[in-house]
Image (tube, rainbow, N blue to C red):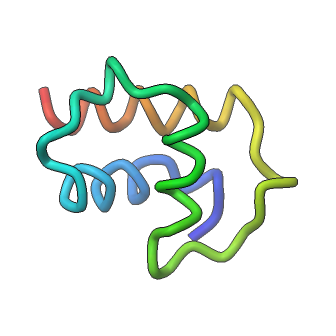
Amino acid sequence: MKWTDSLEIAIQLAEAHPEVDPKRLNFVDLMTWVMDLPDFEEGESHCGEKKLEAIQQAWIDEVA
């Protein structure tokens, strides 16, 4: 997975952290959790605020 795979990342984060409200998650934690996913292949240097926003929104939509 890469930073642009926001829906797949969101699904995996929702499964890994079911107790978390993605609306209240800060981007530092979100970035760390994404990079900790087992199939994630990219580093921090490829990340940006827009990509984190897309992942967060996909996660919000996934759990809604």
Pick out the residue farthest to the bottom: 38
Location of residue 60 with respect to 20 vertically, above or below: above
The quarter holding residue 37 reads bottom left
Location of residue 37 with respect to 19 vertically, above or below: below
Location of residue 32 with respect to 49 vertically, above or below: below
Location of residue 7 with respect to 25 vertically, above or below: below
The image position of residue 20, as x and y in percent, is: 21, 37
The quarter holding residue 44 reads bottom right
The quarter holding residue 43 reads bottom right
Say how many tags the image has: 0
Q: Quadrant of the N terminus?
A: bottom right
The image position of residue 51, as x and y in percent, is: 65, 37
The image position of residue 13, as x and y in percent, is: 32, 54
Pick out the residue farthest to the top: 23
- Residue 1 as seen in the image, left or right of residue 10: right
- Residue 55 as seen in the image, left or right of residue 35: left
The image position of residue 41, as x and y in percent, is: 66, 76
Q: Quadrant of the C terminus?
A: top left
- The residue depicted at 59 percent of the width and 46 percent of the height is 31
- The residue depicted at 56 percent of the width and 73 percent of the height is 40
- The residue depicted at 64 percent of the width and 64 percent of the height is 2
- Residue 30 as seen in the image, left or right of residue 42: left
Nearest the viewer among 21 and 42 is 21
- The residue depicted at 71 percent of the width and 27 percent of the height is 49
